[in-house]
Image (tube, helix red, strand yellow):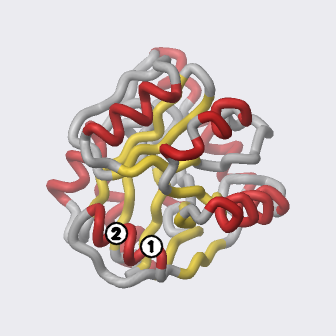
Amino acid sequence: MKVDLHLHTCYSPDSNSSLEGIVKRCQKLGIDCVAVTDHNTIEGALRMKEIAPFPVIVGEEVMSSSGEIIGYFLKQSIPKGLPPSEVMARIKDQGGLVCLPHPFDGFGRYPLKTSDREILVSHIDIIEIFNARSIRGNFSAQARSYAEQHGFLCSAGSDSHSTREVGNAYVEMPAFDDSEGFKIALGKGQVFGRKNSVIDRVATGISTLPKRIRGHRHV
């Protein structure tokens, strides 16, 4: 399976990607599974799970009080602004997995603060070692080194905010049925990816500005 483990839909305030558009893009590229990780909501992921002809992992990119944390295999949304320890506890309480996205990319991103990352290291399951939206390649090298040092599973995702970016990064891995099977499969996976276009990133920021000003989660 080719699995894009980090993407955003129109249920995120900074994306206008329709669910139908993402499905079509995945089918065109041969992406077999996605993790929908909208900001501070699982509403889009649940809806995608209903309409997609392929497996969908219900995820959420939660803005904790100390940076962003992704939860996979969630059943309930986790509100933003909680301490990172509480966010991780709520993910685990749902039988979910804790992933740190773009952990060393501070250029306009919100990685979990280093001090909190080290305090909570035993609660982390996965490190995102390739994020197609990160500008500098050395972030990936740092993330891979950190994951190897601590024995974490490694993930990759397009972090797409437009349909054109979907599938720019993915993990090729065996099929799985649940979160435990996912962990085993991810451990056997290989990461592939290329950087998202800076032009697409700027265009997405401009196109979603009215939506973000209004405070709408989706259109």
At a point 64% along the width and 59% down the height, the residue shown is 150
Q: Tell me where residue 136 appears, x and y as whole percent.
A: 83, 56
206 relative position to 92: left or right: right
At a point 75% along the width and 45% down the height, the residue shown is 105
Disc ID at residue 65: none
- Do we see residue 190 in this rendering? yes
135 relative position to 98: left or right: right
The reply to whether the C-beta atoms of the residues labelled 2 and 1 are less than 8 Å apart is yes
Q: Tell me where residue 189 appears, x and y as whole percent.
A: 49, 80
At a point 48% along the width and 25% down the height, the residue shown is 211
Where 141 sits versus 171, above or below? above
Q: Tell me where residue 179 appears, x and y as whole percent.
A: 29, 61
Q: Which residue is mark 2?
A: 182
Where 201 sits versus 34, above or below? above
Where 88 sits versus 149, above or below? above
Where 210 sits versus 30, above or below? above
Q: Amino acid at mark 1?
A: Leu
Mark 1: few/some/many CA within 10 Å (<14, 14-19, 20+): many
Mark 2: few/some/many CA within 10 Å (<14, 14-19, 20+): some
Q: Observer-nearest residue: 94 or 195?
A: 94
Query: How many angstroms separate mark 2 from mark 1 (CA)?
Result: 6 Å
Q: Tell me where residue 100 appears, x and y as whole percent.
A: 57, 47
Toward the left, the furthest residue is 50
- Do we see residue 17 in this rendering? no
Q: Is label 2 in a helix, a strand or a loop?
A: helix
Q: Which residue is mark 1?
A: 186
Quadrant of the frame with the C terminus? top left
Q: Is label 1 in a helix, a strand or a loop?
A: helix
Residue 217, quarter of picture: top left
